[in-house]
Amino acid sequence: MDAHIPSRSEPVSSKQFAFLRTLFIPLIIFVFLYFIQWLTRENGNNYKPIVLYPLPKKKPSPSMPCGVPVQNDPIIKVNNLKTYLVGSYVEHRQEVKMIKTIAIVLRSETTKYNCLLCCSGQTTSVPAMYNIHSDHFGFEYGTADITCQLPENCETPTHVAITSRSSNKDGSSQDIHTFQPVRNQQKQEVFPYEFTVCISVMYDYDNVLELVQAMEMFKILGVQKVAIYKTSCLPKTQKVLDYYIKQNFVELIPWKVNSYIKVSRGWQKSVSSGELHYYGQIAALNDCVYRYMYQTRYVALQDLDEIILPMNLKNWTELLPELERKYNQIGGFEFENNYFPLSITDSSPKYSPDSWKKVTGVNILQHIIRISNDPTKFNNFKVIVNPRLVFQTTVHGLLQTVRNSVRVDPHIARMYHMRSIPREIWVTRSQIQDTHLRDYADSLIPAVSEVLRQALGI
């Protein structure tokens, strides 16, 4: 049967209309898209698509207490003076509450200072006193304490600036460009750390192996924090430091005093020229004592090539309570220096893994010959102290304390010091085989190897 074909005059059924609509709508969309594409191609050089980007997050503005920027790290130069500020701290141990600012000053410059205090957004200027430490080894610059009493209208300043004495009572004539935070706001009786080691100072440092060995020995001995005042080091050294910073074991304090003062690389001006003793080491040590005064029970002031070892106990955690009992809770403990010349080595493979040979530096386990000390002469020492009993410290010992320090019997503990010693000195002394440091080798060797693997890929 033939299909019925409707004439033009016949009405279109609803099914036929739906079919035509289904074809027509996609055709319209296709034509529209083609037209847009043609416009884009024709005006390609002028076409700028609208792209929505997320709004940038606003960066927090820098801290501006009392309308002045803050610098948290040393060194801050005082305007118009050759005075350089290291750190400011509340001094709780005097009859009158005050702020002490540790500074490096030109000893020949006579001046008067003011403290410009920031309290709740308002500034108050008060006169300050200063005292230059007795240990400066004859260099032009020395460490000083700049102190000011806190007035009734500003008993808890958050920041301070040191200025030269102003003719205006409010200090407004001074061009204050930087505030420094005031630390140690509260006295503490409970401390997050038992032992902190202060290392001052690190410059051009490339002794990677000994750095790792020192850090791991500190851990074995019970240390929880190491503060390093760093001027400069090699890239591999920085990688190791970054590893320990991530562990929250090391704090680096930038120490750029050489940007302002010609520093000496030694302690004798006649031998090593400069205007400031050994990179400003004494100022850094004093700052470290105050910086950690209420964070740690004890502070050890020493260098990276020095290790204080108990003779019959395992670590400092056992040693210090014993010393407190023996010496009636004295303020500081002096550990006599013992030299182990770097030129005398014992290269036993057991104490020198192959991986250690891939990095620069001294292997402390290879040095087991100790040079005897002359009992008739002064022998240097380093200290472990209760920082809350110290007002001023120096390289070897304490200058001002609440209690005196005591020399520890070397049969109880002594300091192992690996360094280059002139042959004419050690050939005249007795040479003693001392392998005590190797008693820690079973713990030290795998720990050092693991750090080298993780930090340097060795």
Image: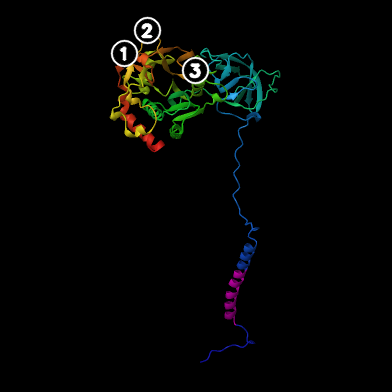
Residue situated furthest top in the rendering: 376
Residue wearing tag 2 = 376
Residue 13: % across, % down: 59, 82
In the depicted structure, whether residue 331 falls above or below residue 182 = above
Q: Is residue 101 left or right of 438 when viewed as pictured?
A: right
Viewer-side label of 2, 1: 1
Q: Residues within 10 Å of mark 1 (few under 14, many from 20)?
A: few
Viewer-side label of 3, 1: 3
Give the dominant element type of the magenta stretch: helix, strand or loop: helix
Question: Image quarter for residue 163?
Answer: top right
Report the Cα–Cα distance between label 3 and label 1.
30 Å
Q: Earlier in the sequence, mark 3 or mark 2?
A: 3
Residue 128: % across, % down: 62, 16
Q: Is residue 329 left or right of 264 when viewed as pictured?
A: left
Residue 167: % across, % down: 70, 18
As helix, strand or loop, the secondary structure at mark 2 comes to loop
In the depicted structure, whether residue 15 falls above or below residue 436 = below
Q: How many marks?
A: 3
Report the Cα–Cα distance between label 2 and label 1.
15 Å
Viewer-side label of 3, 2: 3
Q: Is residue 395 left or right of 374 when viewed as pictured?
A: right
Residue 122: % across, % down: 66, 26
Residue wearing tag 3 = 272
Mark 1: amino acid: Ser
Residue shown at 57%/14% (left/top)?
131
- Please provide the residue range marked out in magenta: 13-31
Mark 3: amino acid: Ser
As helix, strand or loop, the secondary structure at mark 3 comes to loop
Tag on residue 430? 1
